Amino acid sequence: MSESISTPDKPEPLPEAEDAKDLFSKFDPLIKQRQDLLDSGLEDPFGLVMERVLSPVTAVCNGRETILLGTYNYMGMTFDPDVIEAGKNALDNYGSGTTGSRVLNGTYVGHKDVEAALCEFYGMDHAMVFSTGYQANLGIISTIAGKGDYIVLDIDSHASIWDGCAMGNAEVVPFKHNDLEAMEKRLKRIPEGAGKLVVLEGVYSMLGDIAPLKEMIAIAKKHGAMVLVDEAHSMGFIGPNGRGVAEDQGVLDDVDFVIGTFSKSVGTVGGFCVSNHPKFEIMRLVCRPYVFTASLPPSVVATAATSIRKLMDAGDKREHLWENSKRLHKGLRDLGFELGTEEPQSAIIAVIMPDLERGAGMWEALLKEGLYVNLARPPATPAGMTLLRCSLCAEHSEEQVGQILTMFEAAGKAVGII
Ligand code: PMP
């Protein structure tokens, strides 16, 4: 005799209050804008899938072999054989993950070793590794500047900096991008005796421009502020030892906290803060985005440590990357494109688009030519701009930069931008 299985009655839906509000309604304008773009027949610029990655500078996307000019793989470390071997060994010897916080069971020898590698790289006393660069900014800023303290920051700061400011509940005082006078004016207005933190970036990632850190740090110190510099886009590349813009401008010793990431030149994932502050180690107990999350997998810290130590001795790669940056900047300008900076200042060259529609059209035309760049748009970009952001890699050959320029010329003419 077979047993009959009764299906439970479907419960009646709960009655809804008349004034119930869909919390998603605030996204309606964005949903419409995105749908309009897709309805126009363009490929989704934010839905690209890399089917195979062939090298730091080439991948198969949408079935097509594509040159990558929109990654943060500035130093091309993702396929370095020593880096890969270190990761594989760590997987074999320590497993796939730590399953715990750094302050409980999540500190392995590899985490201590990558912090030692960072101290060597920067010549600093302390290094603290986070699970992402986003969390490093979130954690350090919110922990050192709290209620009643003042944070003076560039208006074009990265989202992780803004979120760190909000989380700590400090008074936030933005100033016009890279404007020394505006920055000093804000510092002068802070009540006497208040704690002050100035937050700057070495390279601003949307336009690829650098900060006048030497002058800014002098002003900050004159007004008794501590200084934090996010060197996410300069580490490994800018400065004689790749320590960043502060090193290049000779002011690294005056920076209280350097924030960085493993997700760009280092070629993996993770974030960090380095500092010479004598009390820095207490951060490990009081910084919530460090304490209340799992630590990085052993394979990640092993690849990061190997990569960081190799970046200490990468002068030739740095030189080649500068050549690439200069060649691309000049070539694009000669073709008639409008660029984010007068001169190349970093490995990022931003091409300014007249509007989102033509920006998306150009992005797709380039992809069809076999070139991937980043399409960047508000709110990530300053002044409502739509940008095609090109980020170069030390592994791009001179020939590839030539190919890239040919592709820009063809796409620019097809879309009517040049
Ligand atoms: N700071 C800056 C300036 C960045 O551009 C980024 C990421 N694009 C981060 C911090 C965050 O880095 P991560 O990817 O490691 O979270």
Image (spheres, grey):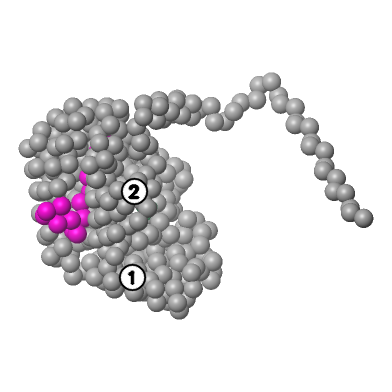
Number of the label disc, if any, that sits on residue 355: none
Q: Is residue 204 visible?
A: no
Magenta span contains residue 388:
yes
Q: Is residue 400 visible?
A: yes
Is 270 drawn above or below residue 27 in the view shown? below
Mark 2 or mark 1, whichever is nearer to me: 2
Residue plotted at (88% across, 49% down): 4
Depth order, front residue of 102/412: 412
What's the amino acid at mark 1? Ile
Depth order, front residue of 7/199: 7
On the image, the x and y values in percent for residue 327 come to 9, 48
Quadrant of the image occupied by residue 33? top left
Magenta span contains residue 4:
no
Q: Which residue is mark 2?
A: 63
Q: Quadrant of the C terminus?
A: top left
Is 54 drawn above or below residue 171 in the view shown? below
What's the amino acid at mark 2? Gly
Number of the label disc, if any, that sits on residue 84: 1
Residue plotted at (32% across, 57% down): 53
On the image, the x and y values in percent for residue 414 come to 19, 30
Q: Is mark 2 within 8 Å of ligand 1?
A: no
Residue stretch in magenta: 383-400
Q: Is mark 1 within 8 Å of ligand 1?
A: no
Spot the residue most to the bottom: 93
Q: Quadrant of the N terminus?
A: bottom right
Q: Is residue 74 left or right of residue 11?
A: left
